[in-house]
Amino acid sequence: MITITKESFGKLKTGEEVSLFRMTNCCGSYIEVLDYGCTLKSICVPNRLLSPVDVCLSYDSIAEYEEQDGYLGAVVGRHANRIGNGKFELNGKKYSVACNNGPNHLHGGIRGFDKYIWQAHTDETGVSFSRLSPDGEEGYPGNLNVCVRYGWSENNELSIHYTADTDADTVINLTNHCYFNLNGGGTALEHVLWVNSHSFCENDSNCLPTGRVVDTADCPAMDFTLPKSIGRDINMDDINLKNAGGYDHNYILSERGDNFAAAMLTCPQSGIDMTVSTTLPGIQVYSANFLTERRGKNGSCYSERDAVCLETQFFPNGLACGFEPAPVLKKGDSFDETTRYSFSLV
Ligand code: BGC
């Protein structure tokens, strides 16, 4: 049985109350989520010594969440990752969305989904968060009803189910921006990663996809078709790694859906292993290159490459690049995508 509890997590600067929900399974493993930013705050699972390890980065106070710029654990939207110059064309009409990352739009704009309190609803095995993103928010067309449900199972599987509908055709790309560290802290460069992908989207020097798709066979440093540590090739003389300061690329998944692993991350020190599966077509492998010296949970200090994000998604800058499937939700259609993170011991 999953036990769900709710407690206060303090107040925003505006005085609004933030709640924390904890979902605990029969083994005592749990996840914690906040209604602020629909944020995944903790994932506590056993290591090989059967001691609990919180495998995601977080902050201790709501004030730090409000101040942060790293999107720790948040659901980002309406469009995760970048849209070049904040411009896209839909049904022959040109739209401009807020630019908040140099010349580009990033993770939903100035006030994206990560900076709102969502409406919470609990059921037997999970917590659902919903919000209405009004027509024109950050420049996006259409009133978008979004719901994100976090589920936690008896065998340490976290599911994130994204659903949405709209009253006008719009752009949508929802992901969760969790920073994983399967050792509970310190560098993640020794984590071993495998990705079910043979190609990735080339980026320019602002981490914006150019439209070119590169075969990993032509780019050994970028290749994760065989498991290797994140740190093994990260400093290689490779233009893709140099441009992004490490891994920060959308990999095109070879297979998707519940029956396929999209990626596997293993921590040799803790023995914790995480398998990702998703219905989405891509995954951003981000080695936390921009996570520079900052205070994290329990007084720890987070530095660059102390975590790995595996953000399942549509391909960034997809409309301008003509990538398929396009990150578009049509009026009358339903957005319905699920990503699962399953934890076990090696
Ligand atoms: C992006 C990075 C960005 C980070 C934090 C990732 O999803 O790919 O380029 O710096 O999020 O905003």
Image: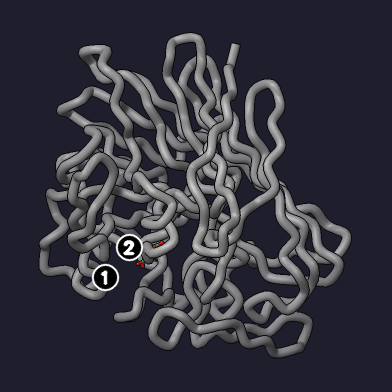
> Residue 60, percent across and down?
35, 44
- Residue at (47% x, 30% y) in the render: 31
Q: Quadrant of residue 16?
A: bottom right
Q: Is residue 295 left or right of residue 148?
A: left
Q: Is residue 261 left or right of residue 132?
A: left
Question: For the residue marked with disc 1, what is the amino acid?
Answer: Ala
Q: For the residue with label 2, is its CB less than 8 Å from the closest atom of ligand 1?
A: yes
- Tags 1 and 2 touching, CB below 8 Å: yes
> Residue 346, percent across and down?
27, 20
Secondary structure category for the residue under label 1 = helix
Q: Is residue 123 left or right of residue 288?
A: right
Question: For the residue marked with disc 2, what is the amino acid?
Answer: Asp
Vertical placement of 153 versus 205: above or below?
above
Q: Is residue 220 visible?
A: no
Vertical placement of 29 versus 212: above or below?
above
Q: Which residue is most to the front? A: 15
Query: Foreground: 7 or 223?
Result: 7
| Residue bearing mark 2 | 248
> Which of the four quarters of the rendered structure image does ligand 1 lie in?
bottom left
Vertical placement of 247 versus 297: above or below?
below
- Residue at (52% x, 15% y) in the render: 154
Query: Foreground: 277 or 82?
Result: 82
> Residue 61, percent across and down?
38, 48
